[in-house]
């Protein structure tokens, strides 16, 4: 029995299913988590299906999370979407579930789950959920339009609107099938990519103050003072990470964002592998898109030095 058959067997077996994703969610985390929930709810209306984790105000147009009691995990199946690290699973109560399934497209960091389906060739975990649906759609699975909207948002989010190298022929095929469902694509794009005035001004600040080395490494430090001056919190800065991506000569870049007790490290690359660097600094991710955490500004220089070495060898 392959992983997809095993997963659908467990979904059919359990009456209560609780679906998780990673902290600090992005459209793929929401899309795969809630898209899968909508498919299960539509296919098996008598089952209890919940989605958990902290709500993200910036993604509220996609979905909102359920607030559930601890005892609901008894005799429940927990499914974790889009999360390579156990520590990054939103809502750690998943460990109380009777069985756990992992569905993810990131390079494996922590091995967990009674069933683990990891496909690093997939553009997104949302693409994997479509794959699950397509493979087993003749086995009672149904795709409501709302699930299609969520999964499409996850795919375009993690592929950068089909610009990233992770985009494959299968990605385009699945996206084409999803847009055949009845949802407002124009509104979805508007919601995903709208930019507030404060974020636009912060992007201007980044473009005025970033550094760039001879090796093609770019860096910018966003302190709490800068955030306060722009009327923003760290949580509101998720959309700034790509602002340096179109600049000629940059091979890899890092954006440091200071919070109360840590410094968020957002890493991106046009070629040099950076997820190994992220792993050295309490993080992980994809070869060209990763995140990490440091606790002192002096460690930012270590991150930049590691990027310099990666670019020098590329």
Image (tube, rainbow, N blue to C red):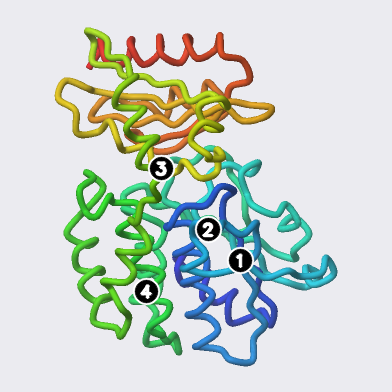
Alpha-carbon distance for marks 1 and 3? 31 Å
Camera-side residue of 89 and 14: 89
Camera-side residue of 74 and 88: 88
User: Does the CB distance between marks 1 and 2 fall below 8 Å?
Assistant: yes
- Mark sitting earlier along the chain (1/3): 1
Q: Which residue is mark 2?
A: 81
Q: Of discs 4 and 2, which sits in the foreground? A: 4
- Mark sitting earlier along the chain (1/2): 1
Alpha-carbon distance for marks 1 and 2? 7 Å
Q: Of discs 4 and 1, which sits in the foreground? A: 4
Q: Quadrant of residue 106?
A: top left
Alpha-carbon distance for marks 4 and 3? 26 Å
Q: Which residue is mark 3?
A: 199
Residue 210 % position (x, y): 33, 19
Alpha-carbon distance for marks 2 and 3? 29 Å
Q: Of discs 4 and 3, which sits in the foreground? A: 3
Q: Of discs 2 and 3, which sits in the foreground? A: 3
- Mark sitting earlier along the chain (2/3): 2
Q: Which residue is mark 4?
A: 149
Crowding at mark 3 (Cα within 10 Å: few <14, some 14-19, many 20+) = many
Alpha-carbon distance for marks 4 and 1? 18 Å
Residue at 52% over, 69% down: 63
- Helix, strand or loop under label 3: helix
How many numbered markers are drawn? 4
């Amino acid at each position: 029995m392959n992983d997809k058959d095993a997963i659908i067997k467990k979904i059919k077996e359990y009456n209560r299913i609780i679906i998780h994703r990673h902290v600090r969610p992005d459209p793929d985390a929401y899309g795969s988590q809630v898209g899968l929930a909508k498919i299960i709810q539509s296919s098996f209306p008598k089952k209890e299906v919940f989605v958990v984790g902290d709500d993200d105000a910036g993604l509220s147009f996609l979905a909102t999370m359920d607030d559930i009691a601890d005892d609901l995990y008894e005799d429940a199946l927990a499914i974790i979407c889009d999360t390579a690290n156990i520590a990054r699973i939103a809502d750690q109560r998943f460990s109380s579930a009777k069985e756990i399934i992992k569905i993810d497209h990131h390079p494996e960091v922590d091995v967990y789950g009674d069933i683990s389906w990891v496909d690093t060739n997939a553009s997104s975990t949302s693409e994997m959920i479509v794959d699950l649906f397509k493979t087993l759609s003749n086995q009672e699975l149904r795709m409501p339009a709302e699930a299609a909207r969520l999964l499409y948002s996850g795919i375009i989010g993690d592929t950068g609107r089909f610009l990233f190298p992770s985009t494959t022929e299968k990605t385009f095929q699945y996206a084409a099938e999803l847009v055949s469902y009845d949802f407002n694509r124009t509104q979805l794009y508007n919601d995903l990519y709208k930019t507030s005035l404060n974020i636009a001004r912060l992007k201007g600040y980044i473009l005025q103050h970033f550094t760039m080395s001879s090796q093609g490494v770019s860096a910018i430090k966003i302190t709490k003072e800068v955030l306060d001056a722009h009327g923003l919190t760290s949580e509101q800065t998720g959309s700034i990470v790509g602002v340096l991506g179109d600049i000629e000569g940059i091979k890899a870049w890092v954006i440091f964002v200071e919070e109360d007790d840590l410094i968020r490290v957002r890493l991106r690359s046009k070629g040099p592998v950076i997820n190994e660097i992220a792993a050295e600094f309490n993080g992980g991710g994809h070869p060209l898109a990763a995140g990490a955490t440091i606790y002192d500004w002096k460690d930012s220089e270590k991150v930049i030095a590691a990027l310099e070495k990666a670019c020098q060898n590329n």
